[in-house]
Image (cartoon, grey):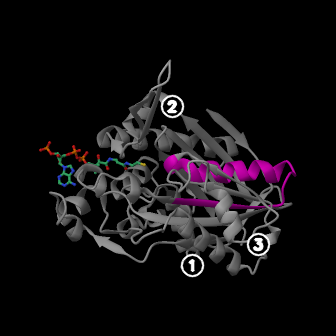
Amino acid sequence: MELSTMQGACILTTGSAVPDSTISNHEISQVVDTSNEWIVTRTGIKERRLLTGCNQSVIDLAVLAAQRALKNIEMNPQEIDLIILATSSPNDLFGSASQVQAKIKAVNSVAFDLTAACSGFVLGLVTAAQFLQNGAYHTVLVIGADVLSKWIDWEDRSTCILFGDGAGAVIVQACSSLNNGILGFNLNTDGNYSHQLSISYKENRLVDFKPPIMQGAFDYITMNGKEIYKFAVSQVPLSILKCLQKLDINLDKVDWLLLHQANERILKAIADKLSIDLMKVISNVSKYGNTSAASIPLALDEAVQQDKIKKNDLIVISGFGAGLTWGTVIIKWTN
Ligand code: COA
């Protein structure tokens, strides 16, 4: 567990992208034994966007989200020093960030992938802030993007109802004020429970050397829904409280609670535990389902576009998911 404070990194702009294709609960119920009522009651999800068609990948969504963020502030991509692509569904196991860098023509930037499932964006944002805080870089593009539809077993009703595809991006820049932007963070990992939610590698082919070499491929998503639910509802409030406490900020000063959009019931249960009014909870899970690393920046961008978030608002952001990983970052909105 790492708890720290830091200053000097501000979000300048946001952008997001989702596939055009919408799949409703009704359409899913034509494929697996489920119903709109079951899905809405247990998760709050009504529909999700899925990447369809050939030769489309996480890159297409990540690029669009990044370009929209850049366009909002008319920033030249050559100003970007670093690109962090948080994704667990790259189109290349060596990483996809470099392809994003090439496509958006951010020729002066270094780019790398960060794999931390649904906590990926929070970890990416905190990583970006370190580079800004220590003066190594001035402008960082952080993208959360996932296309978990490619890793779902569409015959498994316990998982296929939950996930959707999407991307969200923020551009973070070094800022001088000590009390603005990213105020603090709290990050956690417990690998003892990694088996509760995973896309594991399975060996199935023997190459005839002496000694033999095993080869394999990645499996579909497997999940213990009940355990993940309990984990999120018990651990996320603790992370938020530790982070606020370290910064000496009272819960009643929180303007927005922006959680990883996994499930409406999880969002409500966490808000309830913290006695945070549901009016302060940002939620778009009904439209997009769980978009993994994309969910937080996608919801942030939507809230910004809708003019919900105002200058100086205090936003508590928490991600949680496979790993298991979970963490909080607290932001004072500076735009
Ligand atoms: N449609 C209809 N029935 C379903 C179903 C579906 N899509 N999925 C499971 N069921 C059935 C189960 O087979 C079970 O039937 P049984 O009682 O006859 O055995 C029953 O519904 C209850 O299943 P259970 O798994 O106990 O449901 P639940 O109340 O725990 O809800 C989740 C399941 C997945 C919605 C819930 O556990 C959850 O949201 N967990 C968190 C998952 C998550 O957010 N993961 C990502 C984190 S990043």
Residue named by callout 1: 305
- Quadrant location of the C terminus? bottom right
Residue furthest top in the image: 211
Seen from the viewer's position, the closer of residues 8 and 81 is 81
Which residue lies at the image location 72% right of the left edge and 68% below the top edge?
Answer: 334
Q: Residue 198's x, y, as percent?
A: 41, 40
Q: Which residue is tagged 2?
A: 190
In the rendered structure, does residue 96 fall within the stretch colored magenta? Answer: no
Q: Using residue 183 as the reference point, say whether residue 120 is left or right of it.
A: left
Q: Secondary structure at mark 1?
A: helix
Mark 2 Cβ and ligand 1 under 8 Å apart: no
Magenta range:
117-145
Disc 2 marks a residue whose amino acid type is: Asp
The nearer-to-camera label among 2 and 3 is 3
Could you give the CA–CA distance between mark 2 and mark 1, rounded to whole angstroms?
35 Å
Q: Amino acid at mark 1?
A: Gln
